Image (cartoon, helix red, strand yellow):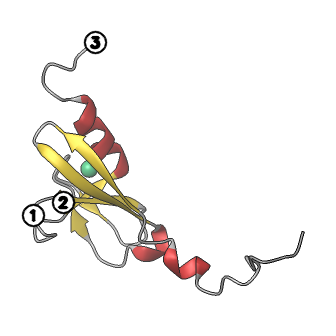
Amino acid sequence: MPRKNRRLREPDRRRSTPMERHLVDGPDGRYQVRRITASGAEKTYRCPGCDHVIRPGTPHVVAWPDDGGGDDRRHWHTGCWNARDRRRPGHYR
Ligand SMILES: [Zn+2]
């Protein structure tokens, strides 16, 4: 088999992954969620889940309404974001 796909050269591979996003259906609509790595967290944010700050260097989550165009981004602790999903009304037990 000839080597026709040259997958060994992927110079931008590391630069294309940090903006990993996915869609999550929550109790109040669909959200886009992005995971922020420790090196990507450069500012202090306030988490709407626990009302505490997220310090620079803390891996966390950014979420915004899928139909909101990204203007309404919120930074959450990863655990708070996950807990928010579990708190969904009618979703106990
Ligand atoms: Zn929090």
- The residue under label 1 is 68
Residue furthest to the right in view is 1
Which label lies toward us, 3 or 2?
2
* Chain-order first, disc 1 or disc 3: 1
In which image quadrant can residue 70 be found?
A: bottom left
- Residue situated furthest bottom in the rendering: 11
Q: CA distance from mark 2 to mark 1?
A: 7 Å
Q: CA distance from mark 3 to mark 2?
A: 27 Å
> In terms of depth relative to the viewer, which is nearer, 55 or 11?
11
Numbered circle sitting on residue 93: 3
Q: Position of residue 86 (x, y in %)?
A: 27, 30
Q: Looking at the image, which residue is at 46% across and 67% down?
A: 37
Lower sequence index among marks 3 and 2: 2
Where is residue 31 shown, x and y percent of the image?
21, 52
Residue 52 location, quadrant = bottom left
Does the closest atom of ligand 1 sit within 8 Å of the Cβ of label 2?
no
Q: Which residue is mark 2?
A: 64
Side (left or right) of 59 relative to 45: right
- The image quadrant that residue 47 belongs to is bottom left
Whether pointer 2 and pointer 1 mark residues with C-beta atoms closer than 8 Å, the reply is yes
Above or below, 84 relative to 50:
above
In the image, residue 65 lies at what x, y percent? Answer: 14, 57
What residue do we see at 13% from left, 69% from top?
69
Please tell me whether mark 2 sits on a helix, a strand or a loop: strand
Callout 3 crowding tier (Cα within 10 Å): few <14, some 14–19, many ≥20: few
